[in-house]
Image: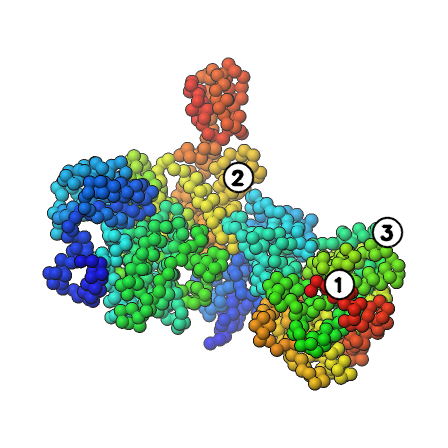
Amino acid sequence: MNNFNIEVNHKTIKAQLGDTVLQTLRKNGINVPTICNMKDFSPTGACRLCVVEVEGKEHLIPSCSHPVEEWMKIQTHSPRVLKARRTIIELLLSNHPDDCLYCVRNQECELQNYAKEMHIIERRILGNKSKHKIDNSSISIVKDPAKCIICSRCVRVCEEVMMTSTFDFSFKGNKTYISTTCDLPISHSNCISCGQCVMVCPTAALQEQSAVYEVLASLHDKGLKTVVQVDPSVPLTIANELGIKNIPDFEKIIYSALRKIGFHKVYDTSFAHDIMILELAEELNQRLNNKKNLPLITNCCPSWVRFIEQFYPDLLQHLSGCKSHQQIAGTLIKKHLSEIEKIPFEKIVSVAIMPCTSRKYESGRTDHYSNNNSEVNFVLTTRELIRLIKMNGLDLNTIEPEEADHPLSSGSSLARLQGFTGTTMNSILQTVFYQKSGKIIENKSLFEFDNFSEGFKTGKIKTGNTELNVAVINGLKNSIQILESIRNKRSNLDLIEVMACYGGCICGGGQPFSYKEKEIRNSLGSLPGTKNPDSFHTPFQNQGIHEITDKIIGKPMSEINLKLFHNINR
Amino acid sequence: MDTGSYKTFLCEVILGGKTKFDAREEELLTVIRKERISRPIIFIGMGTCGLVAGADHTFSMIQKYLAGRDIDADIVSTGCIGFCNSEPIVDIQLPGKTRIAFKKITEDKVNSLLDDIFHGIISEEQVLWQFRSDLLKPWDKIPFSDEIPFFRYQHRVVLGNTGIIDPFSIEEYIAKGGFRAYIKSITSYSPDQVCDIIDQSGLRGRAGGGFSSGKKWKSALASKEEIKYLICNAEESDQGAFMDRAIIEGDPFRIMEGIAIASYATGVSKAIIYIRSEYHTAIERLIGAIKNMKDYGLSGEKIWGTNFNLQIEIRQSPGTFICGEETALINTLEGKRGMPRHKPPYPVHSGLFNKPTLVNNVETLANVASIIEYGPKWFYSIGTVTSKGTKVFSISGNVNHIGLVEVKMGTTLKDIIYTIAGGMKEDKKIKAVHIGGPLGSSLPADCLDTKICYESLKEKDAEMGSGGLIVLNENNCMIDLVHYFMNFMQKQSCGKCIPCREGTRRMSEIFDHIIHKPVDHVNHTALDRFRGVIQLEALSEVMKDTSLCGFGVSAPNPFLSILKYFRKEFEEHLFDRKCRAGVCKELRLFMINIDQCTGCSICAKKCPENAIIGTPKSPYFIVEEKCTGCGICSEVCAFGAVYLK
């Protein structure tokens, strides 16, 4: 008796035992609004928007948490239900700032959408609004509690996926609000800046710390040379966001657009990713030879670095000493421009466009500074880039593609995919394997993830006469088990790749709100090398790196590279 | 004979199941029951109500008196007998004589009282009653407790021992028949049978919901999980409700016995008493009771030779109203924020640490021992068709006897107020009875014939709640009462679900607008007031329909009840801006009679709001917009020129 029939809106539909009412309705294409419900999370039943009328029940029941039962006769949009939903939205609006036109989430806001759907055109419920201060302390995330509707999505994401628990409820009754631990400013809290809370926030209560105006100001300043690096995940997302499909070199259109916006030079971050891979591969070789500090853990994700610094400081020596690709690119760009093109160091403004809010935090870390100056001056998220493009009135359909500037002009096809979890691991293994055997691993899908939330994968790989045990983790939740085993010296792993967010940077906290992971994955065909084996190439096949080696940079782990690309502090 | 040998005697003879006693045993029992005494005993009501009235000072004064005069007497502190406005109550029992109760024995009255009583004189003013006893010689001309109306119309089951026995003495409780039901349950009944007995008795949850306890126990028993929990919910935060506190303070062993039987019946080996941290006295007595039970082998492992293990633990609540809700309570026990969870799953299927958890109210559990002892038929015979047994109420407000009463289900409100509680204070007219605390409803004077029963109260749109009764007279304003409750609720809502968090807040604000004058608030014009009021009913409806837990569902109750029963008074506030009880000060409008005003300017000088203007020696004038209705001008005017419009 696992399947039975229920009646919804006078029609009989099939239901499965163990599902909630909401799941059943959604499977049958019946849409019920909800704010607090999140996929893959246990329901809390807080927002009460998903209420439905069930015959025989005194009150309306929340469909998100109520299990479906055999006798149920459900009305999803009866007048009583509609009235309740409308009142709930009106209640929320009565304590919400009336400043949609000045809001970063204008037309992208779930509350606004529901208000429109419920046809709320009058302020019927009036009252005092809670007064809150905006928390502007963090370089990556801004919290505006006045706009918060206390759906607790950020609380759950931070606690259940990111294992950080920065946010929780504070106070009670009408003074309830979401605060950080001990009500500290975000900059002083344990926030790892991953931005997943921004991604789940239905309103603008949590948003990125925007740098659009600062970038515009430096673009307009004639005395400064503003250059930009673009993460390969960004064009991918924008193409998807704007509905552009199968344009072979969409990133080149973005490069062109950025030049039109006024950037002096445009670089490709995937080039730096290749450098990072070569460094990591060499570092792994050294550690394997010395049998010291194994496993080697990648540190290309700044949220992950912050997480391990906060919660597992005793394991810090396992982290790679290498900087992340953003910082490597930043170093390289400033070095190249100041040494080769003779632009004074302080006149260079280096901007990075990244899919992640955490990169903002990384750019502000003083241990990444050189010459008392940040290697990357400003970081824009994908969302901010879209704003910048729209602000400049650019039509991406009519722009001619252009190449990125020398020397960071292009990366290997693997580096293009760096936003996806497992790619970094794949690249390192390819490199190590090639160094030992002179061959490329043919099974290149070794660490590709079919399911984004799979989160955790281990494997073995034979290179020459050594066998490497490797693990790929996405979602900090999945890292705890491995970290504990390393701490207790029960781990036999040699190399671990960790990305804080589920799915990797492609699902980072700076991506557009409406994007869908699956569609991006489907549009991967547009990237070189993903379908066509001829154009597939690996970091050590990147000719650009060989060209600048011994001119600007040295060989991996050479003294000059250690100075340039490795964090001295660690 | 010392307490150690009492223990063997009590365990072997009384709890051993013996019903016929020989002369020696009979004598021993009367000694333990404090019927046969060799020296005087002075009992002091040391419940929280007594302590507030100064019982601890009385206690030390009595000690001093006895020490100073070298009198050999015992002092026993008891709980509250329920006659709270006569506290501190001191009972005195002289050898061979019945126990006699005196009211309001504060520190200063101790000497004269004891002087008199030890000389056989009784001051008529102070005496309350004497307790009936077959063995002892009664005092002359003193009413027996069962003769005075306060006790005569009560039916004391749960409160049978409170205020009478020593709450620290397990011996006395056992000697009075305690723990026999418990031993009988674990030795001769199966858990199934105990659940059946409770089910047959018709006992329903006393916390307000009125769900059948037997059915709840059965579903807890049916669960196959190895670890189950039982929680005794003593987080009592309703205003004007103090039943649980008094029961625990007066008779902690009865709760323990109830918990133990319930644990056995549902297969629980770990029981938790969840109590308000403010209830210091109650907690102290519970700790004592738990220790005593362990000493007597009534808790621990392999109790009484059976396979039943029980561990009882006290947990103090962090102290918010919402923690009385069972799922919020469970959340706090897990170390989380006290916020309700959605139901289903119900705690009885998945509660504390996702294990089956039986949550029962103090009063429900306090009934259990008697049901087992006297059988389900006895309990079933008390009360109405649907509601069985008795109910404890705490009566407060404008009645003569504020306190704790236990009545049969089916007793009318009128009987409780006029017969038991001694009628209205100063013979004022009754206006309303507020039943069920901040989430309850107010019933008007013409509903006093309503019977106490889950169903008949529901017919009147009221709920039993946990049992707080607040009696209001003509000097109380219903709108002010609702405003108070609304304000309380907007502060106590946990903030989880939107209808409750925002709804209580808006309702509270709308009531703010009704009872306050538009001084310098934002959004506070007559138009806004009416715009708010037309939303009130719709808002309450949605809150009732959609809120997550009972708090939000019941939060509009006080408002809905006054809308039903006191609509006229509500409209007066709204349209005429008048408060007939004179409670809503800001609605009072003072004026100056120009014929009587001499222009002395005293009112203008004293007005805290500078609302009175004028020039000396000519009549003054009150600016209506500025006046807050404090009434100082009318008090200071020597010429009676200021009058209330």
SS at mark 2 in the image: helix
Number of the front mark, 2 or 3 = 3
Query: Horizontally, is A457 left or right of B362 in the view?
Result: right
Name the subunit of mark 3.
A
- Viewer-proximal residue, A68 or B369? B369
Query: Horizontally, is B432 left or right of B102 in the view?
Result: right
Colour scheme used in the picture? rainbow
Query: Horizontally, is A346 left or right of B435 in the view?
Result: right
Quarter of the image that includes the C terminus of chain A: bottom right
Number of the front mark, 3 or 1 = 1
Q: Report, in whole angstroms, how far the alpha carbon at label 2 lies from the one at label 3.
A: 60 Å
Where residue A23 appears, as percent x and y from the top left, is: 55, 68
Name the subunit of mark 1.
A
Residue found at the far right of this picture: A341
Residue B529 numbered tag: 2
What residue lies at 40% left-to-right and 58% top-to-bottom? B315
Amino acid type, callout 3:
Gly
Where residue A551 appears, as percent x and y from the top left, is: 86, 68
Asked if badge 3 and badge 1 are on a common chain, one would say yes
- Viewer-proximal residue, A550 or A20? A550
Q: Report, in whole angstroms, how far the alpha carbon at label 1 lies from the one at label 2.
A: 60 Å
Report if the CB atoms under discs 2 and 3 are less than 8 Å apart. no
SS at mark 1 in the image: helix
Q: What residue would you read off at disc 3?
A: A223
Amino acid type, callout 1:
Gln
What residue lies at 64% left-to-right and 47% top-to-bottom? A98
Looking at the image, residue B312 lies above or below residue B124: below
- Viewer-proximal residue, A414 or A5? A414
Asked if badge 1 and badge 2 are on a common chain, one would say no
Residue A327 numbered tag: 1
Number of the front mark, 1 or 2 = 1
Q: Report, in whole angstroms, how far the alpha carbon at label 3 lies from the one at label 1.
A: 24 Å
